[in-house]
Image: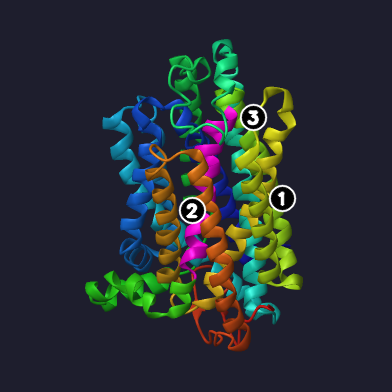
């Protein structure tokens, strides 16, 4: 039988699978579906700007008061509101729901990371293993299920929008504007391939997304153990000064390791936003039609899901550094190729190669960066993961902000620059952790289900 901790990992992973089946599908379509006046990209920019604001103070406050479980439920409700906003997309519906989603986004992800780290440490203590190894495996399992949401969410959009035959007509002159050879700022203007699908089809798709989002909330609320209930209750009774909790995220910035990890964390936002916002619009929608966006992103999701599970287990034997450099090499190769490739519908298989390689790389960026934060800051998990979401979101919002006025070629150069900067700064932190391992967490109790566990002498070091 599986352990109680692993059961909780599966519950969270399944909840995120359903939730991001909805949100991931909508995010992939925003730059193409709501292209008028850049409304879709603007809504994504507002989302991640709001996440930055919420990362500054909300995660520690919500997690310490509500506990991880109910912070997850509240955060999921904020994501579902964005689906409602897409029923009748406009500036007055998308922007407010984007703000709500952003405010709930950072507590949601911080609570998830905190919960998985707690489960990993407790299970490692029971089995006499390194805490970092179990945490890596748990994050691998999570991202295996979570990233598969891109498959199901995009499959839904492609099958539903594929019923509208008018969106597949690609004029020859439009192909000359696709890819990095042209500036790429006006791809959607006047192109039949970017004509909005029939409203009935949009309602059908968004209705399905709302349904799976609500199901995600029910799964977590009913089946997830409240493992830090006593900690949250004690925090509420102790009445810790608000200012101390409010500034927890910023106090951690005194740690030079966190500052050095900022380029790596921001690059995670840059690379995800490029695929969701630029590749889908300037390569896929431009040359194939909007109904192909889902199929291409399914390839990304499948590769990401499988590789997340694989690399989560492989890290125990290779160490993080080797995986990070492998991901950097794959991304570097893709960026160089995208600078010179001219999209051609006759080369259909190439459209799937890039998201496949991108998904493999993103699996490493996501699993290993999350695990790295959990290993480096075991005593400040809430603040550490809030910083993670804040800096990653800054990468997102920056990329979406310049999306409407920078040529695609320059966007690729910016992406390449941050990748190279990451390769300079990340090894410094990894080498220091190898020489000076983070001190183990001792005698932390997490009570909330039948299995009461106490962590003892958990080793946080991961091999370089």
Task: Say which element carries label 2.
Answer: helix
Q: Tag 3: Cα neighbours inside 10 Å, few (<14), some, or many (≥20)?
A: many
Q: Mark 3 points at which residue?
A: 343
Q: Tag 1: Cα neighbours inside 10 Å, few (<14), some, or many (≥20)?
A: many
Q: Can residue 260 be seen at all in this image of the molecule? A: yes
Residue placed most toward the observer, 159 or 347:
347
What residue sits 53% from the left and 46% below the top? 412
Inspect the magenta stretch and tell me whether residue 336 lies in it: no
C-alpha span from label 2 to label 3: 25 Å
Residue 64 image point, x, y percent: 36, 69
Residue placed most toward the observer, 143 or 76:
143
Q: Which of marks 2 and 1 is nearer the N terminus?
A: 2
Above or below, 401 against 462 in this view is above
Left or right? Give the position of 301 relative to 269: right
What residue sits 27% from the left and 69% below the top? 246
Inspect the magenta stretch and tell me whether residue 262 lies in it: yes
C-alpha span from label 2 to label 1: 21 Å
Which SS does the magenta portion mostly show?
A: helix
What residue sits 46% from the left and 21% below the top? 202
Above or below, 327 against 123 in this view is above
Above or below, 289 against 283 in this view is above
C-alpha span from label 1 to label 3: 27 Å
Q: Mark 2 points at which residue?
A: 269
Q: Are marks 2 and 1 in contact (CB under 8 Å)?
A: no
Q: Give the magenta range.
A: 261-284
Task: Say which element carries label 1.
Answer: helix
Residue 102 image point, x, y percent: 36, 49
Task: Say which element carries label 3.
Answer: loop
Q: Tag 2: Cα neighbours inside 10 Å, few (<14), some, or many (≥20)?
A: many
What residue sits 55% from the left and 11% below the top? 166
Q: Residue 306 carries which label?
A: 1
């Amino acid at each position: 039988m599986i352990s109680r901790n692993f059961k909780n990992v599966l519950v969270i992973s399944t909840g995120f699978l359903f939730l991001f089946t909805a949100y991931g599908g909508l995010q992939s379509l925003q730059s193409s579906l709501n292209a008028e006046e850049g409304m879709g990209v603007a809504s994504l920019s507002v989302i991640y700007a709001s996440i930055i604001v919420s990362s500054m103070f909300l995660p520690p406050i919500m997690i310490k008061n509500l506990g991880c479980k109910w912070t997850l439920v509240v955060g999921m409700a904020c994501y579902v509101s964005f689906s409602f906003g897409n029923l009748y997309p406009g500036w007055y519906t998308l922007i407010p729901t984007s703000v709500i989603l952003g405010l709930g986004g950072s507590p949601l992800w911080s609570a998830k990371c905190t919960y998985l780290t707690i489960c990993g440490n407790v299970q490692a203590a029971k089995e006499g293993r390194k805490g970092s190894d179990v945490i890596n495996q748990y994050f691998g399992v999570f991202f295996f299920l979570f990233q598969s949401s891109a498959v199901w969410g995009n499959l839904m959009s492609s099958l539903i929008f594929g019923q509208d035959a008018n969106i597949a007509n690609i004029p020859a002159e439009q192909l000359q504007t696709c890819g990095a050879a042209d500036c790429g700022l006006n791809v959607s203007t006047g192109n039949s391939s970017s004509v909005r699908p029939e409203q009935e089809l949009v309602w059908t798709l968004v209705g399905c997304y709302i349904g799976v989002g609500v199901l995600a909330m029910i799964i977590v609320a009913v089946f997830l153990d409240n493992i830090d209930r006593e900690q949250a209750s004690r925090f509420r009774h102790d009445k810790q000064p608000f200012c101390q909790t409010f500034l927890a995220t910023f106090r951690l910035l005194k740690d030079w390791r966190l500052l050095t990890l900022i380029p790596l964390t921001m690059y995670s936002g840059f690379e995800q936003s490029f695929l969701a916002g630029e590749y889908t619009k300037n390569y896929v929608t431009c040359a194939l039609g909007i109904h192909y966006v889902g199929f291409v992103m399914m390839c990304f999701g499948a590769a990401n899901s499988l590789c997340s599970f694989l690399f989560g287990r492989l890290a125990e034997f290779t160490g993080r550094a080797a995986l990070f450099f492998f991901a950097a090499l794959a991304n570097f190769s893709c960026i160089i190729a995208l600078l010179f490739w001219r999209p051609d519908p006759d080369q259909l298989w190439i459209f799937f190669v890039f998201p496949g390689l991108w998904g493999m790389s993103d699996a490493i960026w996501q699993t290993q960066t999350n695990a790295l934060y959990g290993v480096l800051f075991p005593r400040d998990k809430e603040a550490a993961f809030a910083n993670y979401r804040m800096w990653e979101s800054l990468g997102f919002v920056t990329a979406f902000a310049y999306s409407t006025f920078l040529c695609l070629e320059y966007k690729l150069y910016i992406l390449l620059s941050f990748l190279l900067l990451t390769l300079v700064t990340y090894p410094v932190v990894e080498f220091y952790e190898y020489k000076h391992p983070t001190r183990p967490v001792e005698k932390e109790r997490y009570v909330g289900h039948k299995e009461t566990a106490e962590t003892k002498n958990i080793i946080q070091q991961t091999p370089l």
